[in-house]
Amino acid sequence: MPRHFIHYYFSQKITENASYALSAILKLYPDAYLLGSLGADLFTESEHKARLDAADPLQLFGVTARHVYTNGSKCQLSYMLGFLSHYALDRVLNPYLSYFASHGVAGYFGGKVETLSRSEIEIGIDRHVIRDYLGMEKALSLVGGLHTRKAILNEITDLYVDIINDLSDIYLHSRKTYALLENVSPDIPLAEGLGRVDYMNRENREWTNELGEKLTLSVDEILTTEQEAAYALLEEYMAMARSDKAPDEKKFLLNGLGKPI
């Protein structure tokens, strides 16, 4: 569960060279896309978030795309494209976070390994993203609320009530869902030891993913290498939402390294 700012940054990067059709949707509803890029992390109830995270991706994205195709909501489409960007990054970074939370994070230049919680590592990564990629001015523009338009919030609430509640075996009342979506306010995380602790694995230490493969990827490298796979997912979802096309299992059930999840 990487934090808000890395998801925001990644969601913007994968659309820099977007097709005309994708760009048109995102220009109409950039606030829906931004809200979607924060994924299930918006839902503070642990049970709701856990069930949404555990939903089968083929079913989640297949059924929501069919719903978008049926009712023609470009707003809901933009939201789900953002949600898909969140999923694409999580499927690579979550194993990274789990490994270093279990094995500790080393200091730079041969420093000793420090035991840090997953939350502390996420905060450290987000601070690096703000400092090295976003810039404080852009980060601060997201603080204090996303100010999503009411019409957008209503459509996304309808999506949850009509579709996602059932898929995830949860129930979020429409008023409660609207309130959770409305009150999103990312905060600037405070992190210690950015120059001491290698949160980003920039010294390329070995770590193991969920398949037991040994990797040395840094977060910087993940942010770059995953963009192509994530963009392919967005284009696939666009095709599904425009033509009632069945999802391509090979795309949705692969991690960012091209391996089965």
Image (cartoon, rainbow, N blue to C red):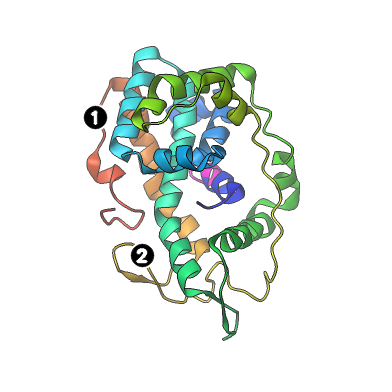
- Magenta part of the chain: 11-16
39 magenta-colored: no
Label 2: few (<14), some or many (≥20) within 10 Å?
some
Q: CA distance from mark 2 to mark 1?
A: 29 Å
| Residue 181 in the image: above or below residue 197 | above
Residue 74 in sight in this render: yes
**Upstream in sequence: badge 2 or badge 1:** 2
| Residue 228 in the image: above or below residue 73 | below
Quadrant of the rendered image containing residue 208: bottom left
Cβ atoms at labels 2 and 1 below 8 Å apart = no
Viewer-nearest residue: 175 or 74: 175
Amino acid type, mark 1: Ala
Residue occupied by mark 1:
246
At which x and y percent is residue 164?
A: 40, 28
Q: Look at 29% across and 50% down and name the residue there.
A: 254
At which x and y percent is residue 43?
A: 54, 37
At which x and y percent is residue 205?
A: 46, 77
**Left or right: 107 as drawn, with respect to 50:** right
Question: Mark 1 falls on what kind of element?
Answer: loop
| Residue 216 in the image: above or below residue 57 | below
**Left or right: 149 as drawn, with respect to 16:** right
Q: Look at 40% across and 45% down and name the residue there.
A: 230
Viewer-nearest residue: 24 or 245: 245
At which x and y percent is residue 260?
A: 25, 54
Residue occupied by mark 2:
209
Q: Nearer the viewer, mark 2 or mark 1?
A: 2
